[in-house]
Amino acid sequence: MGKKNSKLKPEVMSDLLDVTLFSEKELLDWYRGFLKDCPDGSLTIEQFKAIYRVFFPDGDAGKFAEHVFRTFDADGNGTIDFKEFVVGLSVTSRGTLEQKLTWAFCMYDLDGNGYITRDEMLEIVGAIYKMVGNFVKMALTEDEKTPEKKVDKIYLLMDRDHDERVTLTEFIEGAKSDPKTVRLLLCTPCER
């Protein structure tokens, strides 16, 4: 019965070249790998969590993976198709700092109302702390030892008008002013 088509249609390729920062060869390589791992053409939440468990074996990456999954799943249908996957990957791996922060803002803005509340920030930061495990947390300063303390520190930096919510502009400007905060918000490792 046939194997799944391992070539992208020209119009799909053209669209992906327009909306991602990948070359045609890279897109084809990603597509082949995606079909190998997801023969039915979609990635489920459980598959996505399994990927995160591999990269964060010392912690519990489940909750954070759910938030990333939700942000990648642009159409909200509960699966990630190849386009959603590669567009999200393009932004998170090759986007500008501002593009990455805008993407992260969407992840932190759990209800999609255009701002991040303290509870929303705490949900994501708490998920990050669970994911990285105790080993990384031992290296934190006293005012960052718990998710609550870290969120307090982030809010001091970002909530410039003290209205208990962070707008996209506040999020980007606040993050840009502190590289350590950017690394946490984007969940990227320290630069050596």
Image (cartoon, rainbow, N blue to C red):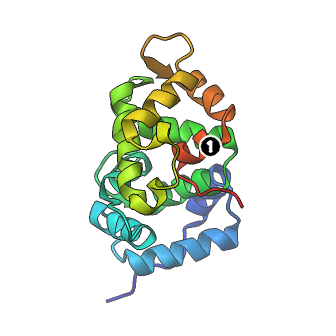
Q: Nearer the viewer, residue 70 or 8?
A: 70
Q: Nearer the viewer, residue 20 or 72?
A: 72
Q: Answer above or below: position of 165 versus 176.
A: above
Find disc 1 in the rendering and name its residue: 180
Q: Nearer the viewer, residue 180 or 167?
A: 180
Image x and y of residue 108, in percent: 43, 36
Regarding mark 1 in the picture, which secondary structure is present there?
helix
Q: Answer above or below: position of 157 versus 2.
A: above
Image side of residue 155 versus residue 44, left or right: right
Q: Name the residue located 67 percent from the left edge and 62 percent from the top edge.
A: 22
- Residue 24 visible in the current orientation: yes
Q: Name the residue located 44 percent from the left edge and 23 percent from the top edge.
A: 115
Q: Nearer the viewer, residue 171 or 103?
A: 171
User: Quick one: label 1, few (<14), some, or many (20+) residues within 10 Å?
Assistant: some
Count the numbered circles shown.
1
Task: Please identify the quadrant where the N terminus is shown.
Answer: bottom left
Image side of residue 171 versus residue 111, left or right: right
Image x and y of residue 184, in percent: 53, 46
Instruction: List the single residue furthest toward the front.
Output: 142
Image x and y of residue 168, in percent: 55, 25
Task: Please identify the quadrant where the C terminus is shown.
Answer: bottom right
- Residue 43 visible in the current orientation: no
Query: Residue flagged by tag 1: what amino acid is it?
Result: Lys
Image side of residue 129 versus residue 191, left or right: left
Q: Name the residue located 52 percent from the left edge and 19 percent from the top edge.
A: 159
Image x and y of residue 63, in percent: 31, 52
Q: Name the residue located 42 percent from the left edge and 16 percent from the top edge.
A: 164
